[in-house]
Image (cartoon, rainbow, N blue to C red):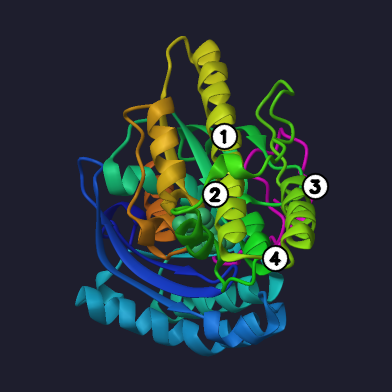
Amino acid sequence: MPATTRPAVVLGLESSCDDTAAAVVRRAGDGSGEILSNVVIGQADLHAAYGGVVPEVAARAHAEMLDIAAERALDGAGLSLSDIGGVAVTAGPGLVGGLFAGVMTARGIAAGAGLPLYGINHLAGHALSPRLTDGIAFPYVLLLASGGHCQILLVEGPEAFTRLGGTIDDAPGEAFDKVARLMGLPQPGGPAVEAEAASGDPSGVELPRPLLERPGCDMSFSGLKTAVSRARDGAAASAGGLTAGLRRNLCAAFQRAVTEILSVKCARALDAARERLGRRPRLAVAGGVAANREIRSALREVDAGMVAPPPDLCTDNGAMIAWAALERIAAGAVPDASVAVRPRWPLDSASPPMLGAGKRGAKA
Ligand code: KG4
Ligand code: ZN
């Protein structure tokens, strides 16, 4: 069947970190998207005892669950493989074992059903998701802030990404998770720290804002976490231990520091994009950290029209992978039956690779 007569419905698979995800998405003739099903099978309980994602455990669980996730996604959409037009899979960046499991599963499904296959960059999936959920027009500036990524991108087309900035060490979600550990709070750390911060006093502890004054949009969160550790030890020594009040204040001060860093750097990125485009584009956010209320409202002050997908589409999911393929197909992309795994795959090949190792390994 020639590609043009295939239905614009794609099955997307995602397994680059600790969520096994599959979804079916349709793209209408007017360019709008519709999520027909969206299945995410998390692995949090498998990794809980280790205090972080164990790549081998993740890979094995993905290999076991991918077929099940794909089947559930098709069932949920009320479709069979003969009704869809293509298969999309995250080919990178991410943990190599999980990527292999996803790519092998997708290759098998595509070959078995005679469907075209598309290898998708996970970061492109996140970056394009505000178009699926809110139909935001190109160009826009995207802040992607999660446990594994931190980038500010200018998005000008389905394959046109310019990195305006990123972390030089930890991702912000990773910093939330580490601070939660320092405070004896459960994982994932973001929601736990946010809950503590709600009744804390952010001015109760002074914390640095690394790289804030440095020109450009690069960020650093690792020194902030170290400063929280020092402040905890110092204050706990004088108070005879980590009191509940001290914990709340430390969480509030940390959250305030992350909020300030992200909003100052996003404002600067919008200015840089305006210079390039001749007009100020809109801001969009994605990634688990975008669920944080203080961060969301600070970013709304940076751009009142900010677009933020609902939390389940901000975090890792298969719908964004299917959607990225649909956007590429509409732009004339050629399928690739022998999609290769790319654990490191920068979105913007013109930018130098970033340093730092988060829960996905080295940053893309
Ligand atoms: O996007 P995501 O589900 O997975 C990846 O890391 O790709 O993001 C998870 C990260 C975790 O580090 C988690 O602590 C953080 O997002 N997070 C939050 C909040 N909810 C999740 N960080 C701050 N505030 C939150 N409410
Ligand atoms: Zn992600």
Q: What's the amino acid at mark 4?
A: Leu
- Label 4 and label 2: CA atoms lie apart by 14 Å
Q: Are marks 2 and 3 in contact (CB under 8 Å)?
A: no
Q: Going from the N terminus, do you reach mark 4 or mark 2 first?
A: 4
Q: What's the amino acid at mark 3?
A: Leu
Q: Going from the N terminus, do you reach mark 2 or mark 3 first?
A: 2
Q: Is residue 229 magenta?
A: no
Label 1 vs label 4, nearer the camera: 4
The residue carrying mark 1 is: 260
The residue carrying mark 2 is: 252
- Label 3 and label 4: CA atoms lie apart by 24 Å
Which residue is found at the position 24% from the left and 45% from the top?
A: 32
Label 2 vs label 3, nearer the camera: 2
Specify start and end residues of the magenta stretch as a single range: 335-364
Q: Position of residue 99 (x, y in %)?
A: 62, 70
Q: Answer with the quarter of the image where residue 248 lies.
A: bottom right
Q: What's the amino acid at mark 1?
A: Glu
